[in-house]
Image (cartoon, grey):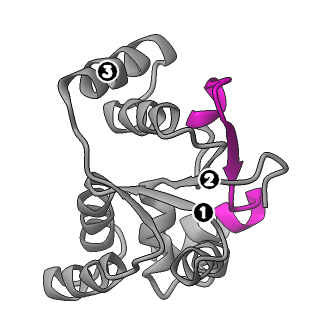
C-alpha cells in the first residue's frame, strides 16, 4: 500500500479488475476486500460503478446481468464511503483537470472528488493520476502484471 495511506479513492479500473476472473485480479481484490471489511478507509464515487460496469461488459466479457449483480453486491458494503455528490462545481473542476492535465474527463472528475473528499491516495491501474500533487497515486499492478492483463484481454 501507498506510503501516503488512506483514505483511498478507488478508480474504475480497480473496481472492475476486482470483479473479474483475470490472473492479476488479486492486487485489486485485496483492496476491495479490505475496504468492505473496513480495514482501510475507502472512498468510491457512485459513478465509478457505471464505469466499472462498462469495463466489465466491454473488456472482460461479463454479461450485463452478471456485472450488474456483482456491482450491486459491492454497493452493499456499508464501511465504504460512497460519494453520491455530483454538483456542478465538481463537474466543472473535473473538466478543468481533464483539460490542464490532458487526461480523460472521468479521470478529471475522480481527481476532483479525491481533492474534495480529502483522499490521500488514488488506487488505479494506470498512471494518469500521477499528474496531481494533491494526493498520492498507487498503481496497483506492476509492469509485468499489466502486461499479463493485456495478454489476457487480447485472447
User: Relative to 70, is 147 above or below?
Assistant: above
Whichever of labels 1 and 3 marks the residue nearer the N terminus, that label is 1
Disc 2 on helix, strand or loop?
loop
Mark 1 and mark 2: Cα distance apart in space: 5 Å
Q: Nearer the viewer, residue 3 or 149?
A: 3
Whichever of labels 2 and 3 marks the residue nearer the N terminus, that label is 2
Disc 3 on helix, strand or loop?
helix
**Quadrant of image for the C terminus:** bottom left
The x and y percentages for residue 141 are 69, 62
Residue 90 appears left or right of 113: left
Q: What segment is highlighted magenta in the picture?
A: 128-146
Look at 26% across and 21% down and name the residue there. 89
Q: Nearer the viewer, residue 91 or 68?
A: 91
Residue 71 figure quarter: bottom left
The x and y percentages for residue 84 are 26, 51
- Residue beneath disc 3: 95
Task: Bin the neighbour count of mark 2 within 10 Å (Cα to Cα): few under 14, some 14-19, many 20 and up.
Answer: some
**Quadrant of image for the N terminus:** bottom right
Pointer 1 with pointer 2, Cβ within 8 A: yes
- Residue beneath disc 2: 7
Look at 35% across and 25% down and name the residue there. 94
| The label number, if any, that marks residue 41 in the structure image | 1
Disc 1 on helix, strand or loop?
loop
The x and y percentages for residue 35 are 56, 74
Whichever of labels 1 and 2 marks the residue nearer the N terminus, that label is 2
Q: Nearer the viewer, residue 130 or 142?
A: 130
User: Relative to 6, is 23 above or below?
Assistant: below
Residue 94 appears left or right of 64: right
Q: Nearer the viewer, residue 9 or 85?
A: 85
Amino acid at each position: 500500500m501507498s506510503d501516503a495511506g488512506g483514505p483511498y479513492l478507488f478508480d474504475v479500473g480497480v473496481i472492475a479488475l476486482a470483479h473479474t476472473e483475470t490472473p492479476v485480479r488479486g492486487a485489486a481484490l485485496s483492496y476491495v476486500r479490505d475496504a468492505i471489511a473496513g480495514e482501510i478507509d475507502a472512498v468510491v464515487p457512485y459513478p465509478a460503478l457505471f464505469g466499472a460496469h462498462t469495463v466489465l461488459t466491454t473488456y472482460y466479457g461479463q454479461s450485463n446481468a452478471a456485472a450488474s449483480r456483482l456491482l450491486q453486491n459491492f454497493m452493499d458494503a456499508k464501511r465504504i464511503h460512497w460519494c453520491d455528490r455530483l454538483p456542478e462545481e465538481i463537474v466543472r473542476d473535473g473538466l478543468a483537470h481533464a483539460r490542464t492535465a490532458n487526461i480523460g474527463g472521468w479521470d478529471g472528475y475522480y481527481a476532483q472528488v479525491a481533492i474534495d473528499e480529502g483522499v490521500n491516495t488514488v488506487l488505479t491501474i494506470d498512471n494518469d493520476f500521477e499528474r496531481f500533487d494533491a494526493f498520492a497515486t498507487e498503481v496497483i499492478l506492476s509492469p509485468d502484471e499489466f502486461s499479463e492483463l493485456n495478454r489476457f484481454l487480447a485472447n
